[in-house]
Amino acid sequence: MKKNIFILSCVFLSTFGFAQKMMTRTGEIKFEASMPAFEEIAAKNNTVSAILDKSTGDLAALALIKAFKFKAPLMEEHFNENYMESSKFPKATFKGKIVNFDASKITSKKTDFDLEGDLNIHGVTKKIKTKITLVANTGKITATSNLIVKAKDYAIEIPSLVKSKIAEDIKIGINLVLENK
């Protein structure tokens, strides 16, 4: 009898602890580095994994570089082989915290928070600060954010031949629909 109560208690506690975490494996990251009068440089990744700890506001995300898809296959090939070196640096990660996070403040109306953490791209980690918008909807939380990064800050070399065709400020948009798992 004591053994059954112990097992039931372990199951309950592990379920309760896990319920504080929300996650996705189908998050989206888009980026654009286009310059006017030149070919569009934009890609999307719909396989981003992310986890949010609702008790602490800790947020972590992982994107596989080869999962970014471009309109032009040749551009995707250059992105992976020449710029991002995806065989050497296969992923980008973020690990941070939503500042002053309070899960009870998340409603069906957009709520903005500050987001701080470490963004690792191309093997280089930089501290970032940005805004994140959270919206609760049918047991899920949608998290969106926009930020700008510079290729040079992450040791991504742009050849001088194409430097004028690629924006220095790369716009990144993030959309995560997180749910209890």
Image (tube, rainbow, N blue to C red):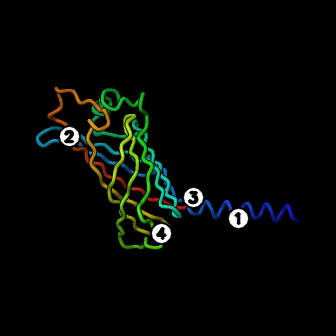
- Position of 13 with respect to 154 (left or right) is right
Instruction: Report how far apart the C-alphas of labels 1 and 4 lie in the structure.
Output: 21 Å
Return the disc, 1 or 2, that comes first in the chain's sequence.
1
What residue is rendered at 31% in x and 27% in y? 82
Q: State which tag comes first along the sequence, 1 or 4.
A: 1
Mark 4 Cα shell of 10 Å, populated few (<14), some (14-19), many (≥20)? some
Question: Circle 3 — which element?
Answer: loop
Query: Which corner quadrant of the image does residue 132 belong to?
Result: bottom left
Do the residues bearing badges 1 and 4 touch, measured as CB atoms within 8 Å?
no
Spatial distance from mark 3 to mark 2, Cα to Cα?
39 Å
User: In the drawing, what numbered circle is on residue 158?
Assistant: none
Q: Which residue is mark 3?
A: 181
Residue 4 sits above or below residue 127 on the image: below
Residue at image mark 1: 12
- Mark 1 vs mark 2, CA separation in Å: 51 Å
Image side of residue 40 versus residue 11, left or right: left
Q: Nearer the viewer, residue 7 or 99?
A: 99
Q: Residues within 10 Å of mark 2 (few under 14, many from 20)?
A: some
Q: Are marks 4 and 2 in contact (CB under 8 Å)?
A: no
Residue bearing mark 2: 168
Quadrant the N terminus occupies: bottom right
- Mark 1 or 4: the one toward you: 4
Q: Are marks 1 and 3 in contact (CB under 8 Å)?
A: no
The relative height of residue 173 versus residue 83 in the rendered view (above or below) is below
For the point 40% across and 39% down, the residue is: 67
Alpha-carbon distance for marks 1 and 3?
15 Å
Q: Which residue is mark 4?
A: 103
